């Protein structure tokens, strides 16, 4: 196989800081996986999820494409989904 990998996991300081603004939750980390299904930004699918390594739990937060959101979904929407997911 040649070329770059078809996915990347973003774990930058900016992404960590944005999660801290979204929710103050102990024991959970927030991750974003980018899948490249074709060339260019329009060929990217992003999957956002929460991980609790202590409880061995992964919770899906959002799947979206660059076409739907050039950056991230709105903070208020993410906060709402995270609260709903973790209240289950």
Image (cartoon, rainbow, N blue to C red):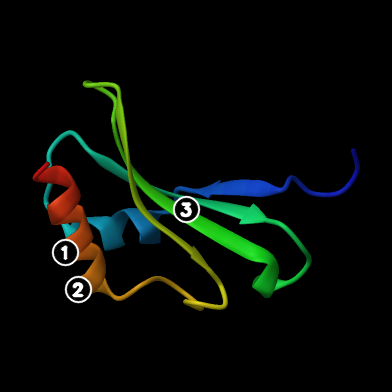
Q: Position of residue 53 (x, y in %)?
A: 29, 25
Between the C-alphas of marks 1 and 3, the distance is 17 Å
Drawn side of residue 17 relative to residue 82, left or right: right
* Secondary structure category for the residue under label 3: strand
Compute the Cα span from label 2 to label 1.
Answer: 6 Å
State which quarter of the image contains the N terminus: top right
Report how far apart the C-alphas of labels 3 and 2 lie in the structure: 18 Å
Q: Residue at x 19, y 73 (%)?
A: 76
Instruction: Give the numbered dot on residue 47.
Output: 3
Q: Position of residue 50 (x, y in %)?
A: 31, 43
Position of 71 relative to 8 (above/below): below
Upstream in the sequence, badge 1 or badge 3? Answer: 3
Q: Give me the disc on residue 80.
A: 1
How many C-alpha atoms fall within 10 Å of the one at disc 3: few (<14), some, or many (≥20)? some
Relative to 36, residue 73 above or below: below
Number of numbered labels in the structure image:
3
**Looking at the image, residue 79 lies above or below residue 70:** above
Position of residue 12 relative to residue 73, above or below, is above
Residue 86 position, x and y percent, is: 14, 44
User: Left or right of 37: which side holds 55?
Assistant: left
Percent of width and height locating residue 70 = 51, 78
Q: Is residue 83 visible?
A: yes
Return the mark for residue 32.
Answer: none
> Element type at marker 2?
helix
User: Which residue extends farthest front?
Assistant: 88
Element on which disc 1 rests? helix
Residue highlighted by disc 2? 76
- Quarter of the image for the C terminus: give it: top left
Tags 2 and 1 touching, CB below 8 Å? yes
Residue at figure coordinates x 69%, y 67% from the top left: 43
Residue found 22% across the figure and 21% down from its top: 55
């Amino acid at each position: 196989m040649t070329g770059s990998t078809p996915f990347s996991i973003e774990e930058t300081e900016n992404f960590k800081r944005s999660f801290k603004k979204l929710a103050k939750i102990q024991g959970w980390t927030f991750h974003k996986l980018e899948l490249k299904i074709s060339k260019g930004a329009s060929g990217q699918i992003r999957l956002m999820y929460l991980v609790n390594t202590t409880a061995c739990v992964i919770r899906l937060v959002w799947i979206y494409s660059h076409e739907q959101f050039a950056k991230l979904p709105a903070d208020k929407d993410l906060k709402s989904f995270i609260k709903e997911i973790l209240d289950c």
